[in-house]
Image (cartoon, rainbow, N blue to C red):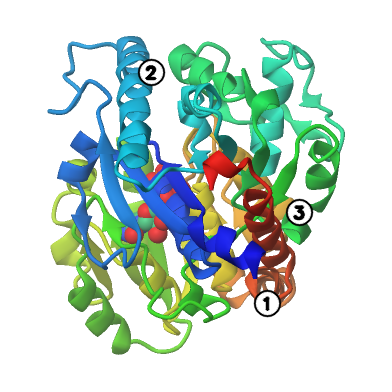
Amino acid sequence: MEKEESVLHAHVLVVSFPAQGHINPLLQFSKRLLSKGLRVTLAITKYFAKSMTMHAPTGPIKVETFSNGYDDGWQKENSTEEYFERFKMVGSQTLTELIKKQESSGDPISCVVYDPFLSWALDVAKELNLVGAAFFTQSCTVCSIYYHVQRGLLKLPLAGTEISIPGLPPVPITDLPSFVSIFGSYPTILTLLLSQFSNIDKADLVLFNSFDKLEQEIVNSMAKIWPLKTIGPTVPSIYLDKRIEGDEDYGFNLFNPCTDTCMNWLNMKETGSVVYISFGSLAELGVEQMKELALCLKDSNNHFLWVVRQSEKNKLPTNFVEETLEKGLVVPWCPQLEVLSHKAVGCFVTHCGWNSTLESLSLGVPMVGLPQWTDQPTNAKYIEDVWGMGLRAKVDEKGVAIKEEIEACIREVMQGAEKGKEIRNNAIKWKELAKEAVDEGGSSDRNIEEFVALLCGAPSRCL
Ligand code: UDP
């Protein structure tokens, strides 16, 4: 009884980096914590709060804001370097104030779950004598690669053709995260990614939006170094275990989804007949790549639903939308989970962002990977070679996947008799394993229970 009471009193502050692919998993994890009896406050930056539209209520999750020094947005004249420096300086200060405000209002924080893009948040937590848990929004595989670089165990620029890390199969350099494989491509972002591990040894827990069976060997290997727990996939409960009432959507959206248009259109289509295409919230395709994909879709026999963000629309070939009205729908943003779970969707052509990958896997939709940058090439390798639930479109010497290649991949994934069949079967298998992980007694469910138990044992001032 005593234990239960302390759990009920534990108050967790979840601190998110301001990006769609970061807030989604952190918010979902918050909902899981809430369902286990904890109280949760989600901290986001002031500017991010202003730019988001909230589509679903966050329920009893309180949302608080802190400043990163850019409350009116980031001006182009500030360099990325300046942005992250100021974020750290002002963020550390205002996050500390936020935590102290909670304490003085009689609602003290016991634990900070922080996005390691904001590694300084762990220093804030430790300064205030709170439990600090890192929550990575990329795969354990990708994070272990960055960790090895940060510790000097993998030296950049990389030599040879592949790397070898305990717990990973040999990974060709071209399949590594782009910031590592293309040395010097985005030095500030690489510095940020490596900084995630600068103070990781101080974290009381290291959480991953993944599940044990998905990345078993690397999870086992990194668990020897970190107090590691997988707690994912953080796809809304309705699509997996259905145990959290009302958890049907992420709740926050950077863009307005064209829900009715998409769902009405999909409702008219036959089972497994639609190719869904999206490159997430950030990736920018080259004009040439856009053209090859457009040509492929225009000439294919399949219906297609293509998310082309407003900022990307000018790259579409002239009259493409008008000329493909019969078979295609192009929208600036869609409710991706609803789309992927619709029976009409037979294949997802994706940039292989980690959230999109986990969503497709959790909903059993086979993928065709067109990775663009960052962690996407590594995710694409795993989709094809390790999980066997998709194909990665090969690129030519200019880095472009041509029409015929994309066409062949889509055909194989949707209709292929041998390889394609195996891919579709694996997609069903992974969907079941994802559900098993978060369902009662599954590996992620147990890990979340253990996290809650850790908070019960935290110093009394924290609870
Ligand atoms: N998403 C969405 N509607 C869209 C495209 C994407 O809701 O039209 C969501 C998608 O479900 C995922 C997130 O945006 O949760 C994208 O995250 P991901 O890690 O895949 O890519 P990123 O945007 O970070 O590159």
Which residue, given by chain and number where applicable, does mark 1 sit on?
Answer: 440
- Total labels: the figure holds 3
Q: On the picture, is 116 further left or further right than 448? A: left
Q: What element carries label 2?
A: helix
Label 1 and label 2: CA atoms lie apart by 38 Å
> Looking at the image, which residue is at 57% across and 60% down?
7
Which residue, given by chain and number where applicable, does mark 3 sit on?
Answer: 386
Which residue, given by chain and number where applicable, does mark 2 sit on?
Answer: 88
Of residues 187 and 143, which is closer to you in this image? 143
- The image quarter in which residue 327 lies: bottom left
Q: Position of residue 87 (x, y in %)?
A: 33, 20
Q: Is mark 1 on a helix, strand or loop?
A: loop
Q: On the picture, is 257 further left or further right than 120? A: left
Which callout, 1 or 2, points at the residue further toward the start of the chain?
2
- The N terminus is located in which quarter? bottom right
Q: Is mark 3 on a helix, strand or loop?
A: helix
- The image quarter in which residue 99 lies: top left
Ligand 1 within 8 Å of the CB at mark 3: no
